[in-house]
Image (cartoon, rainbow, N blue to C red):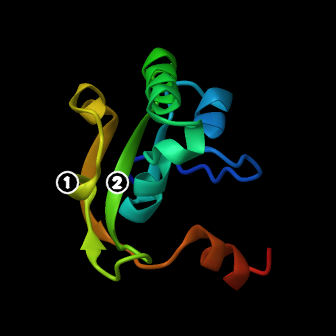
C-alpha cells in the first residue's frame, strides 16, 4: 500500500472514528477482525449509537480498506463480506484482496514501541 497510498500510523485514540475525525477524508486500513469490532453496537451504546457513528464517518468523508484476517473469537478467516453492517453504510468498507495476520499491536511490539 505504501507505493499506492500515503501511509500514516495513528495511535492513541481508542475508536477508529476518533482517528478519522483528526484527518477527515482518510481511508483507514484495518483487518476484518478490527472492522467487526468497529461495527459492534455494544461499543456505541446500541444500534442507534452505531448508526450515529457511521453517519459521522459519512459526513467527514472517511472510509475503510478491510483486509481478511483470522477472527480471534471464532478462529475463522473473515473478510469484509462477513461483516454485519447496515447496507446503507456498506460503501464505507472496501474489501482488499490481501491477508496479513499480524496485528498493529504486534507490529509496535516488534519495533520496541
Dot 1 surroundings within 10 Å: few (below 14), some, or many (20 or more)? some
Q: Position of residue 80 (x, y in %)?
A: 26, 54
Foreground tag (1 vs 2): 1
Residue 110 location, x and y as percent? 68, 84
16 up-or-down from 100: above or below: above
Which is nearer the eye, 6 or 46? 46
Q: Quadrant of residue 106?
A: bottom right
Q: Which mark identifies residue 81? A: 1
The residue shown at (71%, 81%) is 109
Q: Secondary structure at mark 2?
A: strand
- 46 over 3 or under it: above or below: above
Q: Secondary structure at mark 1?
A: helix
Write the residue at 25% across / 51% down.
Answer: 95
Few, some or many residues within 10 Å of mark 2 (<14, 14–19, 20+): many
Q: How many marks?
A: 2
Counting residues from the start of the chain, the first of labels 1 and 2 encountered is 2
Q: Give the quarter of the figure containing the N terminus.
A: bottom left
Q: Residue 36 at x, y = what percent? A: 40, 55
Q: Which mark is residue 24?
A: none
Instruction: Kindly identify the residue that appears in the image at 57 percent across and 24 percent down.
Output: 24
Whether residue 18 can be seen here: yes
> Looking at the image, which is closer to me, 79 or 106?
79
Residue under circle 2?
66
Who is closer to the viewer here, 86 or 30? 86
Residue at the farthest top position:
59
* Residue sticking out furthest to the front: 46
The correct choice, above or below, for 33 with respect to 23 in the image is below
- Alpha carbon distance from label 1 to label 2: 10 Å
Amino acid at each position: 500500500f505504501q507505493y499506492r497510498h500515503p501511509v500514516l500510523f495513528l495511535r492513541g485514540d481508542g475508536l477508529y472514528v476518533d482517528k478519522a475525525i483528526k484527518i477527515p477524508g482518510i481511508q483507514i486500513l484495518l483487518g476484518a477482525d478490527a472492522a467487526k469490532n468497529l461495527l459492534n453496537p455494544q461499543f456505541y451504546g446500541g444500534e442507534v449509537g452505531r448508526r450515529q457513528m457511521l453517519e459521522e464517518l459519512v459526513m467527514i468523508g472517511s472510509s475503510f480498506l478491510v483486509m481478511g484476517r483470522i477472527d480471534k473469537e471464532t478462529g475463522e478467516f473473515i473478510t469484509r463480506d462477513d461483516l454485519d453492517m447496515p447496507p446503507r453504510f456498506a460503501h464505507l468498507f472496501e474489501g482488499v484482496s490481501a491477508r496479513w495476520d499480524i496485528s498493529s499491536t504486534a507490529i509496535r511490539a516488534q519495533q520496541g514501541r
